[in-house]
């Protein structure tokens, strides 16, 4: 199952065509009949040719397997334009070219009265009038430029570029000054739009800007009829080649004035305008660039395919569109550079070209060492050093005068480098599906970055430009304050965040599009600027920013950066340094330290108030937060549980007086691996809330009181040493284990004063306000359970569910707990991701289908094999990737391999895959392989079913779509809990529970305002002693078990285990098929059939849950009790 975004390579509105052999008709009307070609034995078994041998050699050396080669070949076929589409494009280009020749000549047009009201000028006309004259005339030439004539145009976003040359007599050589050329360019484009407006051969017309540059508006045309959305023709207005001189040097200034306010501030000197110069030069050179690329392409047969693969790679990473993008043109130029400098050869395949391109990007920093395609530049061409003084990223075109990366920020190029480096890391990893990771998996910012924040009111960036003294740069960007301030804001944040982040990225503003009848949109109309943080887990949550020593020359710079937050502090090593201390007590507060830093720096240096910033780094965490004074998401509570368990483990090891020694003490509970949604918290019991049991004096709930607080028993497995004294009978072993439970309880009471209650199956220990459930285990007991003696006295060994359950509880679960505990030590947010994932599954009523252990393994796979991402650095991004994994993984045809402790080699992956395919029909529908479980998928044997997995996949896909929309769209009602509220319309019966008897009510997604006293009081918890509280008592769970036991053949029952007040019932379709009535005596007459009595069943629901049930709602027939 591949998510809808991954189908980025499927052409819209073009139905798939089945490959079939056509049957041409003969002259006489008869059809030609095809016959299979018969090959002789010598032809069938002839040796391979040299070409075939080369292909086999290439496949073996370049690809992990031939499948990867075939996948790439199929992808190239998918993104290539069909012949039918090319014919449509060619005919539309011819029609537009004919219309362009009909543009009328006109005299001097000093005002805009010649334009009809249905066409506006796509340019901000400030001031209203300017020097110079303008008139309309037919274009001097019309030429195809860009990717289409080069053969590198790809689906799904088909853009065909047409260059329309303005006649030389319309322009003046000095039009380059004062923005007169961009103004005339826009006027000429409006004149063309007016010419097209009355034509029936044009479908729709809209304005846009080339890569978001407001100085370079373009006209978007689509064909009429059903093909209107299949491709877009972009009309570029260009000056005659070589018309403007003096723009070759990026340091020269050609905007004399733009706004009066700026003129008043810049009193002397002519500031350089490199970005303005580049925009004009960009209009002069497209034909020359096409000629250069055509010459390179003619010498390399795989050039077009290499560009196509690189464009797909860029598209999946959202780097190919918007202002300052690394577009398809730059991808073509990059490949051309590698070919002309002989870094790749003309004989290389598209696969090799992509690999070498990514390797070059990963290893070459164009922000420091720019590159140039100019082989013999003229004497006026600037040097690379001059380009570096004017631009952040430098890639010079063949003319030697244009920096093709003029609009790309250093931040975007670092992101490009990071993505290329990441791709190269998993490219050769045989355990990773390289094709899907490289080319088929979309990487939106919200799913890639650990934290994301948005700047919403972009008009505030005007004051930022003034605050940061960027008025010269503002003039160079023609008043676009967003793109003027962006590089400086990024640089400021990088200084402040420092080693807390690995990477800072920003969104690329989409190219604006608007109707030809509308005015050009203002800069503030752009969507919010989004920034992504890739956190460094070790340092991101630190509350202390330690600076230089007080007498250091760097101290002044540190104080200037942090302002009033900087203060002198003395540390334990006696040093006195500048330091900044951020707020944060719990881990969930410390995770948001980057938010405090960003807010402070933007307010201090860029004049951007906190109200303009929208931080979405941890919005989803609210659903697992507890505590009112100091909110927590479970990290601190889990740590307390682990510390208490470690103490208990040490005391168990030191016990003396046991008949056999203890060989291992292992935790087997999710809280001990930091993954329980709401970890147990130490509780102080209010004894007045309970009655006493007569015999054991244990606490029992009082009748009429609310259900007491639920106390989770934390399972601990205690393995005893092997000995010949252990019996070989299953019943005797159980008795011995019971005796050990009694003995352990007595020793713990004697030495440590712990309150204990031994049972045949376990020993409950009340310690530190927590309950630990110790289970004694004997390593040979599962084998004894498998053995039996038949009637002939022969020993038979047969596997059974009882032995499997015991092995799961005493061997597999403790091993999984210790392994995942180690994973938590490597990745601090692993537990947080697991808690969010389980909260979503529980809220959507899927916690029985996807068990806790299964969920932990699914989340572990996100950290152990994160390709094409990095391991999640925050719980929120981990949840998004978890939903993506559920909804997009191909559960039918692939096993999910979780390589715990990196114990699996490439050969093991192959073995697991082969065994999976050979036995697919008998294996669980959701198959998870681990180093200790390669063939059976023990964790998913019983659940989920096929139907439940389909439901989980569907809901996960919708939740992912909705959640990402909620997080990134500020216009939405901000309520991320919407993905935690299940759709109840699909269920037949709803059993509403009495909140008073739901012990975990406070954990609900939407907890009620009314709370109930549940026998817990505030205060310090005693480490030992005290009466044993009511343990593991949850009426909702017990009622669900009774319902499933009684009516499991008729219905499925669902409930949120974390405070859910509704039990949803779904009737099984097969339960309502009439079946013959079975009796033991023969009955004559008509056969009687039986069907379930729904009314009686609903009444049974009510009777069985008396006191717990509030109402029963039969939604299908609207019955109620």
Image (tube, rainbow, N blue to C red):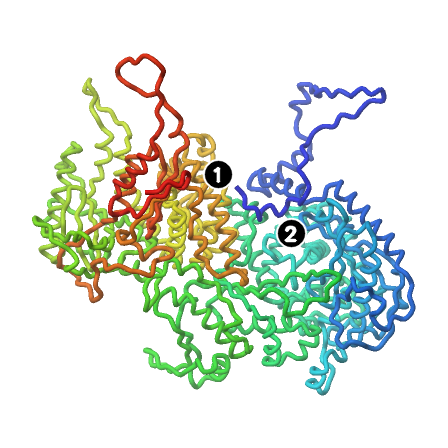
Would you name the residue on which mark 2 appears? Answer: 310
- Residue 641 place in picture, x, y as percent: 26, 57
- Residue 782 place in picture, x, y as percent: 24, 35
**Dot 2 alpha-carbon crowd within 10 angstroms: few under 14, some 14 to 19, many 20 or more:** many
Identify which residue, 1119 or 122, lies in the foreground: 1119
Q: Residue at x 50, y 61 (%)?
A: 973
Is 700 placed left or right of 799 in the picture? left
The mark that comes first in sequence, 1 or 2, is 2
**Dot 1 alpha-carbon crowd within 10 angstroms: few under 14, some 14 to 19, many 20 or more:** some
State whether residue 303 appears in this view. Answer: no
- Residue 852 place in picture, x, y as percent: 35, 47
Instruction: Give the number of the disc on residue 949.
Output: none
Is 1049 rendered above or below residue 563? above
Q: Secondary structure at mark 1?
A: loop
Is 683 rendered above or below residue 925? below
Closer mark to the observer between disc 1 and disc 2: 1
Would you name the residue on which mark 1 appears? Answer: 894
């Amino acid at each position: 199952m591949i998510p809808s975004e991954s189908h980025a390579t499927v052409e819209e509105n073009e139905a798939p065509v089945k490959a079939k052999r056509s049957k041409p008709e003969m002259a006489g009307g008869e059809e030609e009949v095809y016959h299979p070609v018969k090959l002789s034995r010598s032809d069938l078994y002839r040796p391979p040719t040299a070409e075939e041998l080369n292909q086999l050699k290439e496949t073996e050396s370049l690809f992990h397997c031939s499948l990867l080669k075939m996948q790439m070949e199929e992808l190239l076929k998918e993104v290539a334009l069909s012949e039918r589409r090319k014919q449509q494009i060619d005919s539309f280009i011819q029609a537009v070219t004919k219309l362009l020749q009909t543009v009328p000549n006109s005299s001097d047009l000093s005002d805009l009265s010649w334009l009809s009201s249905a066409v506006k000028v796509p340019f901000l006309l400030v001031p209203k009038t300017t020097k110079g004259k303008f008139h309309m005339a037919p274009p001097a030439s019309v030429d195809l430029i860009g990717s289409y004539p080069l053969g590198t145009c790809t689906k799904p976003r088909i853009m065909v570029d047409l260059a329309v040359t303005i006649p030389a007599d319309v322009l003046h050589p000095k039009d380059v000054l004062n923005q007169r050329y961009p103004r005339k360019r826009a006027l000429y484009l409006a004149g063309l739009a007016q010419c097209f407006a009355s034509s029936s051969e044009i479908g729709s017309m809209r304005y846009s800007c080339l890569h978001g540059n407001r100085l370079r508006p373009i006209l978007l045309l689509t064909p009429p009829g059903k093909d209107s959305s299949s491709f877009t023709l972009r009309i570029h207005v260009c000056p005659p080649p070589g018309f403007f001189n003096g723009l070759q040097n990026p340091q020269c200034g050609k905007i004399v004035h733009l706004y009066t306010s700026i003129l008043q501030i810049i009193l002397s000197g002519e500031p350089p305008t490199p970005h303005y110069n580049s925009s004009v030069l960009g209009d002069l050179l497209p034909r020359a660039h096409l000629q250069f690329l055509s010459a390179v392409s003619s010498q390399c047969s795989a050039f077009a395919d290499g560009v196509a693969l690189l464009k797909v790679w860029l598209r999946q990473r959202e780097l190919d569109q918007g202002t300052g993008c690394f577009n398809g043109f730059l991808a073509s130029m990059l490949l051309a550079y590698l070919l002309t400098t002989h870094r790749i050869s003309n004989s290389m395949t598209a696969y090799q070209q992509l690999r070498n391109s990514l390797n070059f990007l990963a290893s070459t920093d164009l922000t420091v060492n720019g590159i140039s395609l100019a082989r013999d530049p003229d004497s006026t061409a600037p040097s690379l050093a001059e380009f570096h003084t004017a631009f952040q990223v430098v890639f010079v075109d063949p003319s030697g005068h244009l920096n093709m990366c003029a609009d790309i920020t250093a931040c975007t190029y670092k992101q490009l480098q990071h993505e290329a480096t990441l791709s190269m890391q998993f490219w050769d990893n045989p355990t990773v599906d390289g094709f899907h990771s490289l080319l088929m998996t979309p990487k939106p910012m919200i799913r890639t970055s650990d934290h994301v924040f948005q700047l919403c009111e972009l008009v505030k960036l005007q004051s930022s430009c003034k605050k940061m003294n960027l008025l010269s740069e503002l003039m160079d960007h023609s008043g676009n304050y967003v793109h003027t301030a962006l590089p400086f804001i990024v640089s400021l944040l990088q200084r402040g965040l420092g080693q807390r982040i690995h990477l800072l990225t920003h969104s690329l503003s989409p190219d604006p599009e608007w109707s030809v009848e509308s005015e050009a949109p203002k800069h503030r109309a752009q969507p919010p600027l989004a920034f992504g943080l890739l956190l460094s887990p070790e340092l991101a949550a630190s509350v202390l920013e330690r600076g230089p020593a007080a007498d250091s020359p760097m101290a002044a710079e540190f104080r200037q950066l942090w302002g009033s937050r900087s203060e002198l502090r003395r540390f334990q090593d006696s040093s006195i340094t500048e330091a900044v201390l951020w707020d944060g007590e719990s881990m969930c507060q410390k995770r948001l330290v980057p938010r405090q830093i960003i807010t402070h720096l933007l307010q201090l240096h860029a004049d951007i108030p906190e109200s303009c910033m929208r931080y979405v780094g941890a919005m989803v965490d609210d659903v697992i937060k507890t505590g009112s004074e100091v909110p927590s998401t479970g990290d601190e509570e889990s740590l307390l549980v682990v510390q208490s368990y470690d103490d208990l483990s040490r005391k168990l090891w030191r016990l003396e007086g046991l008949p056999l020694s203890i060989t291992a003490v292992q935790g087997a509970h999710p809280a001990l691996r930091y993954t329980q949604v709401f970890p147990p918290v130490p509780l102080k019991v209010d004894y007045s809330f309970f009655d006493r049991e007569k015999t054991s004096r244990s606490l029992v709930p009082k009748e009429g009181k609310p259900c007491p607080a639920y106390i989770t028993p934390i399972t601990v497995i205690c393995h005893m040493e092997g000995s010949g004294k252990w019996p070989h009978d299953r019943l005797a072993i159980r008795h011995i284990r019971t005796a050990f439970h009694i003995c352990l309880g007595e020793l713990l009471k004697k030495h440590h004063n712990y309150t204990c209650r031994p049972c045949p199956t376990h020993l409950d220990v009340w310690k530190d306000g927590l309950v630990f459930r110790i289970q004694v285990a004997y390593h040979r007991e599962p084998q004894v359970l498998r053995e039996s003696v038949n009637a002939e006295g022969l020993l038979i060994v047969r596997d059974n569910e009882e032995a499997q359950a015991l092995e799961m509880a005493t061997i597999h679960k403790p091993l999984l707990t210790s392994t995942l505990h180690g994973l938590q030590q490597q990745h601090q947010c692993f537990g947080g991701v697991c808690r969010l994932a389980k909260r979503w599954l529980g809220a959507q009523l899927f916690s029985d289908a996807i068990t806790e252990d299964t969920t932990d393994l699914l989340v572990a796979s996100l950290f152990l094999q994160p390709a094409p991402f990095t391991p999640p650095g925050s719980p929120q991004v981990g949840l998004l990737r978890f939903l993506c994994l559920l909804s997009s993984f191909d559960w039918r045809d692939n096993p999910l391999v979780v390589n715990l402790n990196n114990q699996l080699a490439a050969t093991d992956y192959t073995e697991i895959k082969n065994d999976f395919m050979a036995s697919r029909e008998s294996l669980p529908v959701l198959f998870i392989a681990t180093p200790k479980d390669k063939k059976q998928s023990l964790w998913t044997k019983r659940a989920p079913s096929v139907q439940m997995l389909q439901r989980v996949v569907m809901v996960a896909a919708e939740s992912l779509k909705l959640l990402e929309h909620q997080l990134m769209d500020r216009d939405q009602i901000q309520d991320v809990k919407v993905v935690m509220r299940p759709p109840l319309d699909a269920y037949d019966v709803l059993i509403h529970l009495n909140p008073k008897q739901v012990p975990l009510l406070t954990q609900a997604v939407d907890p009620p305002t009314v709370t109930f006293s549940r026998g817990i009081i505030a205060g310090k918890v005693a480490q030992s002693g005290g009466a044993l509280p009511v343990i593991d008592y949850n009426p909702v769970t017990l009622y669900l078990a009774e319902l499933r036991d009684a009516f499991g053949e008729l219905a499925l029952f669902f409930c949120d285990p974390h405070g859910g007040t509704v039990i949803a019932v779904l009737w099984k379709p097969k339960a309502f098929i009439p079946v013959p009535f079975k009796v033991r005596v023969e009955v004559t007459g008509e056969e009687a059939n039986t069907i379930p009595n729904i009314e009686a069943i609903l009444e049974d629901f009510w009777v069985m849950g008396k006191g717990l049930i509030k109402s029963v709602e039969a939604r299908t027939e609207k019955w109620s009790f």
